Image: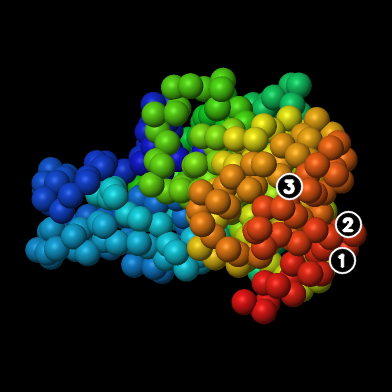
C-alpha cells in the first residue's frame, strides 16, 4: 500500500521533522484559498499520485500569487497523469498539495529499503538530491553512502550521526539530519514499510526540511496497522487487482495479452517464464491457491475476462486439493456468464482429471486440452499472436 506525499509528510511532521507549510486541496477554488492562506509570494501545486516523475509529466506547477492559480489547479485536477512509472494508462489526479516555495541552499537524498541479500535494513543517503537514486547509482555511485542496520540491535546513534556528517560538516545541520534519519528509520520499521524516502531533503537557511517524501507499506503486514487502511487511495490502484483482493485471490496485472490461471505461486512463476520463453507476454500473475472452490475459480476467470487486453487464456493446474472437475465447472461457469468466446488452452493434471477433461470437452466452449506443459505454452502464444 502506497502513501501520498502529503500523508508521508504528515507522519514525518508528527515526529518533529520540518516540512513546508501547505494544505491538501480537492477542487480549484480550495487550491486558490489554500494558496492565499500561505501569505507568500510563490506557491507550488503538486499532483498527488502514486508515482514519481510528476514534474516532467506536468503534475507540478510553481506559480506566483499573480498567476491564475485556480486555472492551473483546474488543469491538473481530474486529469490522468502519465509518467515514466505509471505506464500509458496513467494515474488519476483527485487531490493537490498546495505548498509554499522555499529557498534551497542544498538538496540531499535520504532513503531506506531492505537489502534482500542480507535481510538487513539499508539506509542510503547522498549529497546529490532531487534526482532518481537509480540514475545517481549509475552515473555517480561514489556519491551514495549506505549504512546497514542489524535487525536485532536496530539503528545505533553513531550510525545516524556518522551518516549525517557525511552529508554536512555543519554541526547544526548535521544534528538535524541525524534526527531525521532516526525518525525515518523508526517509521520504516514501525509501519512495516518496504520503502521510506525523502527526496529532496533540503537545507534552507539553518533548517533541514523534507521537501518531498514517499512511503510504501508492506501489504502483507497491514493487519498489524489497521489504522493505516483509512489512508488507502483506491483510485490509484488497478481495479482488477482490487476486485481480486476482495475475492481473496493473489493477482498482479502485467502488460501482456495472455491471461493465466494457475494454482501455486511456484508453478505460476514457471508458467509466466514459459510464455515469455516462447515469445509471448502474460497479462497477469494469478494464483487461485490449492483449496479453491468452484466459485473462486469462476471469480478468477471473470477477472481475466474483464481485462480487455486478454486475447486468450492459459489454464495450468496440477490438481491436488483443487480437483480438476471443480476447476472445470468454475471456468465453464464464468465463460457462460460472460458469453466470451476467446480461446482457452488448458493443461490440467491431478485429482479427478478424467472428469475435468470430460466437462471441458462437452462444454461446447473453445477449450483445447494439451497434456504437455511446454506444448501448451507454445500453443497459447501462437493463438495470441494470431488474434
At mark 2, the secondary structure is loop
Foreground disc of the pair 1, 3: 3
Quarter in which the C terminus is drawn = bottom right
Position of residue 361 measured from the top left corner of the image (x, y, whole percent): 75, 55
Residue at label 1? 375
108 with respect to 194 (left or right): left
182 with respect to 120 (left or right): left
Is the residue marked by circle 2 packed among few (<14), some (14-19), or many (20+) residues within 10 Å? few
Gap in angstroms between the C-alphas marked 1 and 3: 22 Å
The residue that appears at 40% across and 33% down in the rendered structure is: 231
Gap in angstroms between the C-alphas marked 2 and 1: 8 Å
Position of residue 238 measured from the top left corner of the image (x, y, whole percent): 48, 50
Position of residue 96 measured from the top left corner of the image (x, y, whole percent): 27, 50
The residue that appears at 54% across and 60% down in the rendered structure is: 340
Above/below status of 371 relative to 2: below
Q: Residue furthest bottom?
A: 386
Foreground disc of the pair 2, 1: 2
Residue in the foreground of this view, choosing between 18 and 350: 350
174 with respect to 144 (left or right): left
Q: Answer with mark 2 or mark 3, whichever residue precedes in sequence.
A: 3
Foreground disc of the pair 2, 3: 3
Where residue 11 sits, quadrant-wise, is: top left
At mark 1, the secondary structure is helix
The residue that appears at 14% across and 63% down in the rendered structure is: 71
Residue at label 2? 371
Tag on residue 359?
3
Above/below status of 330 relative to 380: above
Residue in the foreground of this view, choosing between 48 and 280: 280
At mark 3, the secondary structure is helix
Where residue 72 sits, quadrant-wise, is: bottom left
Amino acid at each position: 500500500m502506497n502513501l501520498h506525499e502529503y500523508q508521508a509528510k504528515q507522519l514525518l511532521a508528527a515526529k518533529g521533522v520540518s516540512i513546508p507549510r501547505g494544505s491538501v486541496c480537492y477542487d480549484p477554488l480550495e487550491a486558490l484559498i489554500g494558496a492565499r492562506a500561505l501569505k507568500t509570494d510563490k506557491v507550488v501545486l503538486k499532483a498527488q499520485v502514486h508515482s514519481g516523475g510528476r514534474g516532467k509529466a506536468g503534475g507540478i506547477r510553481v506559480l506566483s500569487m499573480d498567476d491564475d492559480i485556480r486555472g492551473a489547479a483546474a488543469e491538473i485536477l481530474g486529469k490522468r497523469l502519465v509518467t515514466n512509472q505509471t505506464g500509458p494508462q496513467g494515474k488519476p489526479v483527485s487531490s493537490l498539495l498546495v505548498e509554499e516555495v522555499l529557498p534551497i541552499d542544498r538538496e540531499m537524498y535520504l532513503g531506506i529499503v531492505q537489502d534482500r541479500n542480507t535481510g538487513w535494513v539499508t539506509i542510503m543517503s547522498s549529497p546529490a538530491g532531487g534526482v532518481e537514486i537509480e540514475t545517481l547509482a549509475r552515473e555517480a555511485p561514489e556519491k551514495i553512502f549506505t549504512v546497514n542496520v542489524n535487525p536485532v540491535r536496530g539503528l545505533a546513534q553513531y550510525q545516524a550521526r556518522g551518516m549525517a556528517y557525511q552529508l554536512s560538516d555543519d554541526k547544526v545541520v548535521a544534528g538535524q539530519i541525524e534526527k531525521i534519519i532516526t525518525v525515518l528509520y523508526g517509521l520504516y520499521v514501525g509501519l512495516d514499510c518496504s520503502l521510506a524516502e525523502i527526496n529532496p531533503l533540503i537545507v534552507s537557511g539553518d533548517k533541514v526540511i523534507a521537501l518531498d517524501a514517499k512511503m510504501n507499506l508492506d501489504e502483507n503486514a497491514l493487519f498489524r496497522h489497521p489504522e493505516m487502511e483509512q489512508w488507502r487511495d483506491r483510485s490509484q490502484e488497478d481495479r482488477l487487482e482490487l476486485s481480486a483482493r476482495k475475492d481473496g485471490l493473489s493477482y498482479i496485472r502485467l502488460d501482456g495479452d495472455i491471461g493465466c490461471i494457475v494454482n501455486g505461486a511456484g508453478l505460476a512463476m514457471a508458467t509466466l517464464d514459459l510464455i515469455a520463453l516462447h515469445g509471448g507476454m502474460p497479462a497477469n500473475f494469478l494464483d487461485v491457491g490449492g483449496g479453491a472452490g468452484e466459485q473462486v475459480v469462476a471469480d478468477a476467470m471473470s477477472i481475466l475476462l474483464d481485462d480487455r487486453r486478454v486475447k486468450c487464456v492459459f489454464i495450468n493446474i496440477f490438481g491436488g486439493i483443487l480437483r480438476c472437475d471443480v476447476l472445470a465447472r468454475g471456468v465453464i461457469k464464468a465463460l457462460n456468464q460472460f458469453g466470451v468466446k476467446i480461446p482457452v488452452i488448458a493443461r490440467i493434471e491431478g485429482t479427478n482429471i478424467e472428469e475435468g477433461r470430460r466437462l471441458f470437452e462437452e462444454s461446447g466452449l473453445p477449450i483445447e486440452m494439451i497434456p504437455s506443459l511446454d506444448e501448451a505454452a507454445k500453443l497459447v502464444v501462437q493463438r495470441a499472436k494470431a488474434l
